[in-house]
Image (tube, rainbow, N blue to C red):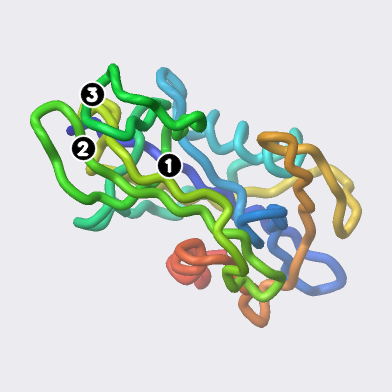
Amino acid sequence: MNEVIQKVTAFIVRERRGVKELLVFKHPIAGVQIPAGTVERDEDIETAVKREVYEETGLQLVEIENYLGCFENEVEKNQRIIAETTQVYIQPSLTAIPYKRKLPKGLTVDYLSTGEDFTHISYIAYEFDEFHKPTCIDTHITGWIPNENLSAQKKRHFFLMSTQAETADSWELEGDQGHIFNPYWTPLSPKPQIIPPQDKWLDFVYDKI
């Protein structure tokens, strides 16, 4: 429960016709996002941020321009983060019936209570509309996770990045779980609308990019 889960976020910026633009992508369920993800075991944060950019935008020719700082711990008192991909059980026992869907490493869940070997959690995933408002619940899981598969520490690193690749203003690629991602460039001014809590990430670095 004491492992610090490392996270990375990529602010990829370009300038076209005198206008600074930020690369974001539309997730079909989760709304408009900034490329971000979890550092894998034995992976450094620079490698991780480039990998996440490739997985969520398809870009390979990216460079780190600057390290923009970090949030020391994003986990609230009523939250926990998945430290290892895990089953969720309907009772605090490994012999209890598990949910079909496992929760992946790096996912933030709501914390309910802690027992000797298990923690009671809840996780709700929403679908969002184009205005970043939830329209329906995609997943709702409430159950028990082994304590060793959870952490109360999440550190997020922010990077300013660039690309030499010539891209369209928008494109498509297949992302996780067969979802179609739609990366696109959007002007930095006015400030783009990003789903929460990612809007706080943008606020944190906005004057630096």
Mark 3 or mark 2, earlier in chain: 3
Q: Earlier in the sequence, mark 1 or mark 3?
A: 3
Q: Position of residue 47 (x, y in %)?
A: 54, 29
- Mark 2 or mark 1, which has the lower sequence index? 1
Decide if residue 88 is on the left or right side of residue 4. Answer: right
Q: Does 28 appear above or below 153?
A: below
Q: For the residue marked with disc 3, what is the amino acid?
A: Ser
Left or right of 2 in this view: 166: right
- The count of marks equals 3
Q: Nearer the viewer, residue 8 or 146?
A: 146
Q: SS of the residue at dot 2?
A: strand
Q: Residues within 10 Å of mark 3 (few under 14, many from 20)?
A: some
| Residue 99, disc | none
On the image, the x and y values in percent for residue 75 come to 28, 52
Q: CA distance from mark 3 to mark 2?
A: 11 Å
Residue pointed to by mark 3: 93
Q: Is residue 37 above or below residue 23?
A: above
**Residue 197 or 119: which is nearer the viewer?**
119
Three-letter amino acid code of the residue under disc 1: Leu
The single residue placed furthest to the left in the displayed view is: 116
Q: Residue at x 26, y 32 (%)?
A: 91
Marker disc for residue 107: 1
Quadrant location of the N terminus in the rendered image: top left
Residue at x-position 72% and y-position 57%: 26
**In percent of the image, x 78 and y 45: which residue is there?**
180
Mark 2 lies on residue: 119
